[in-house]
Amino acid sequence: MQTRNLIIRHAEPEDVPGMWPIIEDHSDQNKELFIRRVLEKRLLADHYIPVALLENQVLGYAWVHDYGPHIRTGHSTARLNDLFVSGGHRRKGVGHQLFQAVKSWCDARQVRWLQWQSSAAGLPFYESLGFKGDSCPDPEHPFFEIEFSAKKKT
C-alpha cells in the first residue's frame, strides 16, 4: 500500500460509518450508538477525531480530547482514547500518521501533556515510535505520557 495518497483529516459525518468495522471487535457498543457518539464528539472543540482515508476508505482513526487548563498551572492535559488501524493496513505508516496528527493537534492547542494507555497488542506500535510505557494499576495496559514544551494557556 502506498501511503502517499493517504489523507488525514478530522472525521466528517460520511466517514463515521467506515470507522465501525475497525473498532467493532473492541467495542461493547452497537454500531448505531457508536456512530451517534462519534458524530456528537466530532463537533466538540476539545475533541479531535482524525481519520486516515485512502480513496474514501477509512483505514484508521484516533480520538483525543483536551481536558482543558488545570486550575492551578493553566496547563492542559489531553487523553488519547483510541488509535486503531484496520488489520490489513497495519505496519504501513497509517498509525504513525494518525499519531502525528494527534501530536500536532495537541501542539496547536498548547497542550502540555498527552497521556494514554495501551493494550498489549498496541505496545509494539508505541515502542516503534520510541515510547516505553510505565506500569500502572492496570498492568496489562501500560501508561504513556508525552510532555510538550511549557506553554501556558491564559
Image (cartoon, rainbow, N blue to C red):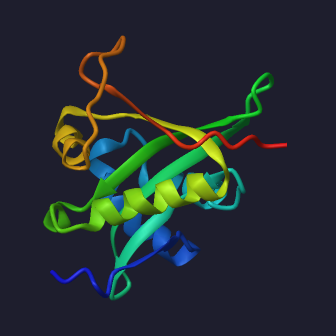
Q: How many marks?
A: 0
**Left or right position of 70 against 5:** right
Question: In the picture, which quadrant includes the N terminus?
Answer: bottom left
In this rendered view, identify the residue nearer to me: 14 or 79.
79
What residue is rendered at 46% in x and 42% in y? 81
Residue 4 lies, in percent from the top left, at 28, 85
Query: In this rendering, is residue 148 above or below 60?
Result: above
What residue is rendered at 74% in x and 28% in y? 70
Residue 112 lies, in percent from the top left, at 60, 39
Query: In this rendering, is residue 136 above or below 90?
Result: above
**Left or right position of 93 against 35:** left
**Left or right position of 53 against 151:** left
Question: In the picture, which quadrant includes the C terminus?
Answer: top right
What residue is rendered at 14% in x and 67% in y? 88
In this rendered view, identify the residue nearer to me: 15 or 68.
68
State which quadrant residue 61 falls in: bottom left
Residue 120 lies, in percent from the top left, at 19, 33
Task: Please say whether residue 154 is visible from this viewpoint.
Answer: yes
State which quadrant residue 48 falls in: bottom right
- Residue farthest to the right, as pictured: 154
Query: In this rendering, is residue 122 above or below 42?
Result: above
What residue is rendered at 28% in x and 67% in y? 94
Residue 125 lies, in percent from the top left, at 21, 48
Task: Please say whether residue 35 is visible from this viewpoint.
Answer: no
State which quadrant residue 77 falls in: top right
